[in-house]
Image: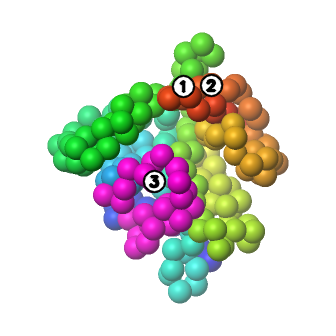
Amino acid sequence: MKLKVITDILPKDFVSIHEQAFEGFFLTSLGSRFLFLYYTTLVKSSKGLVICLFDDSDNLIGFAAGTKMSKGFHKEILLRNLFSYFYVLLHLLMTRPVSIIRLFKNLNKNNKVNDDDGNYAELLSIAVPPNRNGNGYGKKLLAGFEEILESFGSEKVALTTDFYSNEGVIAFYKGLGYEIAYDFIAYPNRRMYKLIKLL
């Protein structure tokens, strides 16, 4: 197995792995066109970071995607790629208008009540297909992601997870040094945890 930082083109099956790992999640419901554009713009951003885990036959096992600086990241990739996002969002507006409202309301997930300045790196998604769970791939991806962030001088990394996630997900992150910083309500009424780890 090998970890590789992706800097240009997404590997084959990248979006498929997201869809398998996050079946039923809001981002997945926006469709494969949106996911492909989202991850492509994330990869091309100077603040984005995507690492992939491949097996010995170069098949994609999973990935970790995030940003070296959380503050304003999503607004920045949207504005820098406005033309590309326009067509995908126009399609969503015609087919699922409510999803556009939710998307824009959740562009900034930080809870201002908690004085979250967003000055940290952030893991936005980590995905391994369900049939590959339990093999330590998620832990390997997360360790690789953090190691690369440290090489860039990051001092802390955050992630957001659903309050109603099974206890195993939260225990997984806590076991790797993440601590719950605060909880908040995302639109429309979804309770979330922000977890932070010092690197």
Which numbered disc covers residue 184?
2
Which one is earlier in the sequence, the residue at label 3 or at label 1?
A: 3
Q: CA distance from mark 3 to mark 2?
A: 22 Å
- Quadrant containing the C terminus is top right
Mark sitting on residue 110: 1
Which amino acid type is shown beneath numbered disc 2? Phe
Residue type pointed to by label 1: Asn
Q: Where residue 187 sits: x, y (%)?
A: 50, 29
- The residue tagged with tag 3: helix, strand or loop? helix
- Which residue is farthest bottom? 57
Q: Quadrant of residue 144?
A: bottom right
Q: Are marks 1 and 2 in contact (CB under 8 Å)?
A: yes
Q: Residue under circle 3?
A: 28
For marks 3 and 1, give the CA distance. 21 Å
Q: Is residue 128 visible?
A: yes
- Name the secondary structure under disc 1: loop
- Residue 103 relative to residue 83: left or right: right
On the image, the x and y values in percent for residue 123 come to 57, 45
Mark 2 surroundings within 10 Å by alpha-carbon count, few (fewer than 14), some (14 through 19), many (20 or more) = many
Residue 23 to residue 152: above or below:
below
Q: Where does the image place residue 12, in percent across and percent down from the top left?
A: 40, 73
User: Which portion, as a residue range, is magenta?
Assistant: 10-33
In the depicted structure, whether residue 143 falls above or below residue 114: below
Residue 119, can we see it? no
